[in-house]
Image: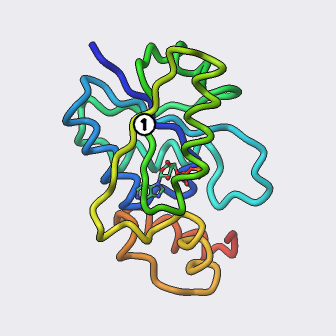
Amino acid sequence: MRTILYPGSFDPVTNGHLDVTIRASHIFDRVVVAVAVNSEKKPMFSIPERMELLRKVLKNYPNIEVASFHGLLANALKEFDACAVLRGLRAVSDFEYEFQMALMNRQLNEECETLFVMPSPDYSFVSSRLIKEIALNGGDVSAFVPPDIARAIRKKAEEGNL
Ligand code: ADP
């Protein structure tokens, strides 16, 4: 049973994250999408909300699970019995940060391998940060996130909670 752990903020989950997760689910027996609990100052969705939204959009994939983790990724690997970390690479601009992180994680846990998946070019310009900016300014994000996520963002906006 080979498990890969996909850590991230997923605030909110986008079509790019989904593309990467589903591609990995064809290769690994189990994919754990793990929301990192960190101290981001102004998240759009709380950790439980992000997990609930991830579960909603991934419900049709029996070998994909949703979880959260605190602390070091190198330790989370053991917690979820995962043999590798999954990350998405959109463009060269992602590379430097990801490269540093992959090597640092291996320093902390020599068994920590990081595997990268390139999304479809349709999603290579999509980021959670841009989705938040578009939503904050009243724009339509429905081309970049699953319908359940677009709905949840609209609801937040209507409630004045963006
Ligand atoms: P972080 O808080 O680490 O930036 P994110 O939730 O933004 O976490 O992203 C988690 C991972 O998903 C990162 O490896 C990031 O490069 C990747 N990712 C984000 N958006 C996309 C996308 N549109 N296509 C492919 N990978 C993506």
Depicted 18 relative to depicted 2: above or below: below
Q: Is residue 158 visible?
A: no
Q: Quadrant of the N terminus?
A: top left
Image coloring type: rainbow
State the residue in front, 80 or 103.
Answer: 103
The quarter of the picture where residue 128 lies is bottom right
Image check: 64 left or right of 155? Answer: left
Q: Please identify the residue farthest to the bottom as the structure is shown.
A: 138
Q: Is residue 2 above or below residue 101?
A: above
The residue lying at 46 percent from left, 83 percent from top is 140
Above or below, 35 relative to 133: above
For disc 1, the neighbor class at 10 Å (few under 14, some 14 to 19, many from 20) is: many
Residue at 62% from the left image edge and 55% from the top image edge: 45
Q: Secondary structure at mark 1?
A: strand
Is residue 162 found left or right of 90 in the rendered image?
Answer: right
Query: Where in the figure is residue 77, as x and y percent of width and height?
Result: 52, 20
* Residue shown at the point (76%, 60%) measured from the top left: 42
Nearer to me, 12 or 23: 23
Kindly identify the residue that appears in the image at 44 percent across and 63 percent down. Answer: 91
Provide residue 36's location: percent of width, then percent of height. 62, 38
Task: Name the residue beneath numbered marker 1.
Answer: 86
Q: For disc 1, does the CB lie below 8 Å from ligand 1?
A: yes
Residue 43 coordinates in the image, percent (x, y): 69, 57
Q: Position of residue 38 (x, y in %)?
A: 73, 41
Depth check, front residue: 75 or 63: 75
Q: Nearer the viewer, residue 38 or 58?
A: 38
Which corner quadrant of the image does residue 73 belong to?
top right
Question: On the rendered structure, is 36 left or right of 65?
Answer: right
Q: Which quadrant of the structure image shows residue 157?
A: bottom right
**Residue 41 visible in this rendered orientation of the protein:** yes
Q: Amino acid at mark 1?
A: Leu
Question: Is 118 positioned to the left or the right of 53 in the image?
Answer: left
